[in-house]
Image (spheres, coloured by chain):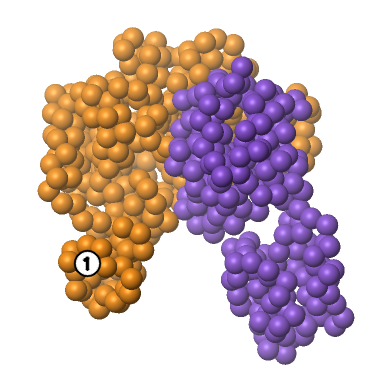
Chain colours: A purple, B orange
Amino acid sequence: MKRPTNGLTIAVPRGALFGEALDRLARLGVDTEEVRTNDRKLLFEDVGVITMRPSDVPTYVAAGAADLGITGKDVLMEQADSATPGTGREVYELLDLGFGRCTMVLATTAGPDLAAEALRRLGVMRVATKYPRIALRHFERTGRQVEIVEVKGSVELAPLTGLAEAIVDLTATGTTLKENNLVIREEIVVCTARLIANPVAHKLKAGAIDEVLERLRAH
Amino acid sequence: VRGRARTSSTCRATPTERPRETGSPAHSSTVPAVIHPIPSGTRDVLPDEMRELREITEVLRSVFDAAAYGEVYTPALEYEAVLAQGEMADARPAYRVFDENGEVLVLRSDMTVPIARVVATRYPQTEPPLRFCYFAHSYRGVRPQRGQPREFLQAGIELIGSPAPDGTAEVLTVICTALDALGLESYRVGLGDAALFPSLLEGHGITEPARSRLLGELTRGDFVSLEQELAALDLQAAAVDLLQRVPRMRGGPDLLDGPPGPVADAMDGLRKVHALLEPAVAERVIFDLGLSLRSIGYYTGAIFEVYDPALGTPIGGGGRYDDLLGRFGRSQPAVGFALGVDRLHMALAGEGR
C-alpha cells in the first residue's frame, strides 16, 4: 500500500523535524525510503509527500497546495498575527505531535544582564531575532520597550558583536548558547511539531483526514 | 518575471522612478519608465478578466432575479456610528475618513449591515418577506494574499422576514441554483449553527474569560489549544471528550441521527432545514458541527460556507442574523449569503472552466 494517507498530500519540513516526521508517516504505512534518501527531489507524488523548508509549510497548506502539513509551533506563531485576527495564514492546527521540542528563550551574554541595564538607562533594549513577531508580542505583553533587529541566521553573533544586547531564539539543548557564552534569562514558549490542515480540505476530505489524525494520535 | 515587483505590492504613494535593474535585460522594452502604484491589496481589472467576471455576475444576476431578489446598491462610504450597530467583530470596517463636518466615515466591510440599515430606514412598514441582491465591493484591512484582497467584489442575497427553517432552505437553494448555473461542478456547502458551540459551553457552565478563548480557538481552527484549554478547566472527562468531539464532527445527514443531548436544539434546526431541501441541494450539503465563521459577530443560527476542491479557501458564506435588524429598529428574522466573485472565478478556472 503506497498511499495510506487516502490520497492526501502532506507537506513535510526538511531540517530538524524531517527524520521524526518521516518516522511518523512510516508508522502510518507510507513508504518513506525514497524521501529519506533523495535529498534533491522535492515532490514525491506516489506517496503524497512534498518536502520544503519548515517556514513554507503553512504557505502551501493555507493555499491548498497540500492538504496536511507538519511544522513547528514556532513557525505557526511567527506567521500568525494575533493582534489582528483573520490576517494570518489560515490553517487548522489539528494535533500536537510532541516531537521536536524546543523552547523560545530570551538570552544575553553571561555576567551582568546588559539588556536589563540598557532598558534601565536607555529606555529600550535591542533584541536580535529570526522571530520578530513572537519577540515583539512577548515584550508588548510584558510591557517593555524594545528595538527588534531581524536577522536571518546565526543570531548568537548579535550580542557578541554589540549589534544587540539580547536575542530571542529557539533552543533545544542550550549547547549553542553556552558555546557562545550566552545565558537564558527568560523562557517565552515551548514549541513542538504540529499537524496542520487546509480548512477546505478539512471539510471536503473529512474522512481521510480524520483517519490520519486518529492513527497519528494513537502512536 | 523574477525580480520584477508587482505594482500592487509597492507601497509608495507617489509615482516612482523605476530603479534601473542591472542584469535584467529581457523584455526591457515592456518595462514602463514610471510606475504609478496602487494601494496594497487592490488591483486593476483589464478587459480579458473583466469579460469573464462579467459573465459570472450576469449569470448570478439572472438567477437572483428569477428568484425575485431585487438588486440594490448602497454607498461604499457610511457613517461609522451607524455601521457599528452591526457588531462586525474582527470584520469591522478598517478604513476611516473624516467628512467636512468632522464625522467619521468608513468604507463598508460587508453588505449585510448596510442592507439591514436600508430595510429599517426605507422599508419601515412593508410586509415581509423582502428579498434583495447586490453586486458590490467591500473593504477589509486583511493581510493581502491570494483570494484575500482588501477590496473585494461580493455577489449576495438577503432574505428579510423569513424565519428558520424555510428562509434558510430558500437561501441554500438559491446558492446551489446559482453555482449550478455557473457550471461549478464539485462545490459543497458546509452547514452548521453559530449557536451550537456557545450553547454547549453554556450547558457545561463555562463562563468568561474561558468562553471567549475557546470560541476564538474554534474559529481559528486551533484544535490543539482548544484541547489544552479544555484539559485545564475543571470538567469531567466525559464533558471534555464531548466538547472536543462535537466541533470536529462533519459529514453527511447521518451525522444528525445520533444527536448529543446538549446540542439537541441546533441538531433539530439542522434536521428541519435538511428536510426542506430538494435532493439536488441536499446532496451538496456537508453538516459541520464545528463551523464557526471567522470574525463576524451577528450570526445567530444556521451558518454556511461554500467550498470547492479547486480553491484552498471558502468561496463564500452566510447565515441567519435574526437579531441584526432589531438593532436598526425593525426586528425581523433574516438570512443571507455572499459569494466572493474573484474566488468564484478562481474556482471556475481551477475546475478548468
User: Where residue A16 sits in the image (x, y, percent)?
Assistant: 70, 49
Residue where numbered disc 1 is placed: B28
Residue kind at label 1, given as amino acid type: Ser
Q: Residue at x 71, y 32 (%)?
A: A24
Describe residue B173's horizontal placement relative to residue B248 as left or right: left
Q: Which chain is mark 1 on?
A: B
Q: Is residue B42 above or below residue A152?
A: above
Q: Is residue B130 visible?
A: no
| Foreground residue among A195 and B27 | B27
Element under label 1? helix
User: Where residue B286 sits in the image (x, y, percent)?
Assistant: 45, 21
| Foreground residue among A143 and A183 | A183
Q: Residue at x 42, y 56 (%)?
A: B143
Describe residue A186's horizontal placement relative to residue B98 as left or right: right
User: Where residue A211 sits in the image (x, y, percent)?
Assistant: 62, 21
Quadrant into which the C terminus of chain B falls? top left
| Foreground residue among A213 and B191 | A213
User: Where residue A82 sits in the image (x, y, percent)?
Assistant: 56, 55
| Foreground residue among A159 and B30 | B30
Few, some or many residues within 10 Å of mark 1 (<14, 14–19, 20+):
few
Q: Is residue B161 above or below residue A167?
A: above
Q: Is residue B89 visible?
A: yes
